[in-house]
Amino acid sequence: MTQKTSALNNKNTSWSGRFNEPVAELVKKYTASVGFDYRLAEFDIQGSLAHAQMLGAQKIISLEDVKVIEAGLAEILLEIQAGQFEWLLDLEDVHLNIEKRLTDKIGDAGKRLHTGRSRNDQVATDVRLWLRATTDQVIAALKKLQLSLLDLADAHFDTVMPGFTHLQVAQPVTFGHHLMAYVEMLNRDGQRFTDCRRRINRLPLGAAALAGTSYPIDRELVAKKLGFDGVCENSLDAVSDRDFAIEFTFAASLVMTHLSRLSEELILWSSPRFAFVDIADRFCTGSSIMPQKKNPDVPELVRGKTGRVYGHLTALLTLMKGQPLAYNKDNQEDKEPLFDTADTLLVTLEIYADMMRGIAVNKENMRQAASEGYATATDLADYLAKKGMPFRDAHEVVALAVRYAVDKKVELSDLPLATLQQFAPKIIDDVYAVLTLEGSLNSRNHIGGTAPVQVKAAIARAKAALNL
Ligand code: ARG
């Protein structure tokens, strides 16, 4: 009896009646999540409102109680938004903090809110609501970055640069074409988030602790109120799996992979050895010792932060792999990696969209580099093949010509016709049109090719797909 009374009077927890001694201070700190899951507050309140309204509609609690709960939660939301809500570590997590405040405000009605619900289905619901909103932000931010890349590509749809394989000059491409490769990657990234959102958007509430509940609940109604496409169909799965969070983090990892590649290029291109581009000063810093330095800090940090997001993906995958069904406290560890993934990704996308608007292109250097690396050698081989020489033979003939030009320290287009004819008598004076950079670009005139008309068309298609 004494013990029961003390449990009911215990101000700080809703489950201590069973325990003979209080939780150790260090353990409280170790197990509390309010230090980070307070970020779910707004969604916790949304979920509670929908749950309470359903309980009322199903006559599980009175409509009077529902009204009082609604008013209390509305006040609490304002307190949180105003930064006046006091989060207590003793109350462990966002859910118990809000519930306790509600009960302090409205008494017994607040204690009825948790009917037919557990923190297990509650937290899974909160995380899904938060992640759905975050996914929408990511999709919008991806589009913004694509738009920024598209504008730069548009301005450089015919700017010649060397295309590389093995980081060796391979064939001429346009800078616009190069940028459009990233627009494509980000397109698939956007699709991945849109697809992942469908699996995020399912309601766990109703699963209760793990097995469902004996109250006559209406899960469909709650799903509808919260904008979910449907309910999670198995209660054990609903409270335990975090695959949707892993998927989100994987999709984020791939975006970071793509941006890390572009960053690596920006770092190379802005080095004086390349001098293809100049990154606006506001995205760079100087050196405290070497006065001449202008460091590409933002791309370097994007490359660095990619590792951090991969780390979160590994953390979440590892978090799940050993867990028996159903809910385990391990799952509390899903939040920090997920929050940091979203924070890192969103700020990276935002800064990248701005940075790409501050890229100045050194067309002369790009062109010079393209004309110096025998980038049109393939064009000469194709020229011979089109005149009837088997491609493999043409390849060998041109290899010899390139070797000759390298020895003489000249470009292929610098070789006189008579010299070229020594390698292949089929060569006539129309060959020089093929050996120019523009000739090479324009000849790749099919969908996906680098001919400037094709790049223009690709930009137009991408803009139309973004509904611009
Ligand atoms: N803070 C917990 C989490 O993030 C909420 C769920 C706790 N459930 C429980 N049975 N202890 O997962």
Image: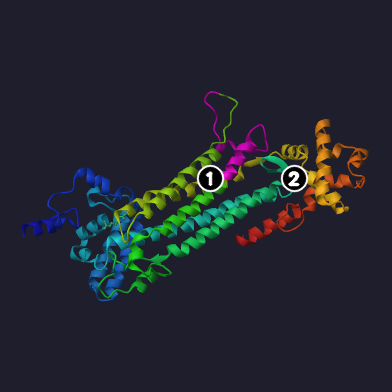
| Quarter-of-image position of residue 206 | bottom left
- Start-end of magenta stretch: 260-289
Residue 268 is inside the magenta segment: yes
Q: Amino acid at mark 1?
A: Ile
The quarter of the picture where residue 142 lies is: bottom right
Front residue of 460 and 119: 119
Can you see residue 257? yes
Label 1: few (<14), some or many (≥20) within 10 Å? some
Is 156 on the left or on the right of 20, as rendered? right
Mark 1 or mark 2: whose residue is earlier in sequence: 2
Q: Secondary structure at mark 1?
A: helix
Q: Relative to residue 425, is residue 315 drawn left or right?
A: left
| Quadrant containing ligand 1 | bottom left
Q: Judge by depth and name the residue closer to the eye, 57 or 125.
A: 125
User: CA gap, disc 1 to disc 2?
Assistant: 30 Å
When the figure is inspected, residue 237 is found, relative to residue 97, above or below; the finding is below
**SS at mark 2?**
strand
User: Mark 2 sits on what residue?
Assistant: 172
- Residue at 28% x, 53% y is 93
Q: Amino acid at mark 2?
A: Pro
**Which quadrant would residue 435 be assigned to in this image?**
top right
The residue under label 1 is: 351
The residue most toward the left is: 1
Picture disc at residue 92: none
What coloring was used for the rendering? rainbow
